Image: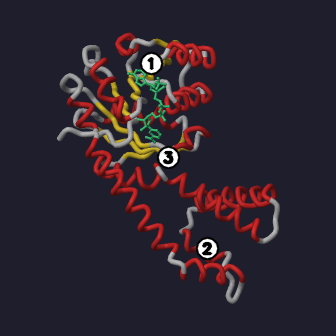
Amino acid sequence: MTGRKVAFLGGGRMGEALVSGLIRSGGRSVEEIMVTCRREERARELKERYGVATTLSNPEAVAWAETLVLTVKPQDMEVLLAQIAGSVQPEHTVISFAAGIRTSFVERHLPDAIPVVRVMSNVAVLVDEAMSVVSPGAHATEEHLEVAEELLGYVGKVIRLKEAHQDAITATSGSGPAYFFLLAEAMIEACILLGLSRDVATELIVQTMLGSAKMLRDTGKHPVELREMVTSPGGTTIAAIRVLEETGVRAAFLNAIDAARRRSAELAQGGDDD
Ligand SMILES: NC(=O)c1ccc[n+]([C@@H]2O[C@H](COP(=O)([O-])OP(=O)(O)OC[C@H]3O[C@@H](n4cnc5c(N)ncnc54)[C@H](OP(=O)(O)O)[C@@H]3O)[C@@H](O)[C@H]2O)c1
């Protein structure tokens, strides 16, 4: 298989989460992973924690690897690309995690014909339940998408979409965990209002969210159908739903997610030089 030797350029939180997931799942052995860092202390830490090779030299990692996973912050991307431009070959697969950085930007800062795949994932990478979306750049083919899908498959679910959808993805599955955390927080507060302790409240709400998420995923039923299952005529649930609808919660979600999409597009504009 192609792409066995993987270099993570930028061993921060996302890079570490991916390395950890890859090793934990057996997707790669430690000998097949290299991580680059900006600071010696961080390189030592990752080496001790996972047993992978680390280096402060991005060109060294590029020369060794087949797959390059770019996990630096968007604002550090240009410097990183300048450091590796002399070593990247068309045989490499470049997978970029930087939010808001277009494949055209990466391609323009590297030699001609480099295959680039852009990824938007989410924080659930940490528990192997990420939702990741991959989009091909101008030179990425089926083979390169498969390399990205294989790697991301170890830490959750992966689908393919055109890059034009990346702002929408950022606003939904990318930021999505934050919306669910906010909902959990609000529901826990509600339990406390009703006189339950915080510990009990947290247990009730977390398990309820998990159970609901599993039903959504495993039954394949539409959310409306599942909601109807717990909404009996004249009952308690419909009394709550009425208040939620009166306060405009549905419109609030539509507006909020649209605002996130607009913000993502604004930030992406700043990260491009079109
Ligand atoms: N697509 C997604 O779903 C998703 C989700 C979260 C994050 N991200 C993206 O993932 C990327 C990383 O985010 P993060 O939260 O992991 O950031 P982070 O913790 O700051 O990690 C970035 C790491 O890269 C290092 N670094 C910077 N420039 C470097 C260079 N030229 N060579 C080697 N290492 C370098 C930094 O070193 P220092 O420690 O010295 O700063 C830092 O350790 C960002 O682009 C973010 O947009 C994507």
The residue depicted at 56 percent of the width and 69 percent of the height is 223
Task: Tell me the kind of residue under disc 2.
Answer: Arg
Which image quarter: residue 101? top left
SS state under label 3:
strand
Tell whether label 2 touches label 3 (CB within 8 Å).
no
Q: How far, Cα to Cα, is label 1 from label 3?
A: 28 Å
Task: Check whether the beta carbons of the residues at disc 1 and disc 3 lie within 8 A of each other.
Answer: no
The kind of secondary structure element at disc 2 is helix
Ligand 1 near label 1 (Cβ, under 8 Å)?
Answer: yes
Give the residue type at disc 1.
Answer: Arg
The residue carrying mark 2 has its beta carbon less than 8 Å from ligand 1: no
First in sequence: mark 2 vs mark 1 = 1
- Residue 3: percent from left, percent from top: 41, 22
Determine whether the residue tagged by mark 1 lies in a helix, strand or loop: loop
- Residue holding disc 1: 38
What residue is shown at x 36% (from left), y 35% (from top)? 74
Front residue (pair 159, 47): 47
- On the question of residue 17 being in view, the answer is yes
| Residue to which mark 3 is pinned | 131
Q: Nearer the viewer, residue 256 or 7?
A: 256
The answer to whether residue 44 is above or below residue 209 is: above
Name the amino acid type tagged 3.
Met
Q: Is residue 30 above or below residue 260?
A: above
Give the residue drawn at x 55%, y 15%: 41
Q: Earlier in the sequence, mark 1 or mark 3?
A: 1
Q: Mark 2 sits on what residue?
A: 227
How far apart are the two marked residues, 2 and 1, measured between alpha carbons? 50 Å
Q: Residue at the location (41% across, 45% down)?
A: 133
> Residue 209 appears at what percent x and percent y?
66, 59
Tell me if residue 1 can be seen. no
- Within 10 angstroms of label 1, few (less than 14), some, or many (20 or more) residues? some
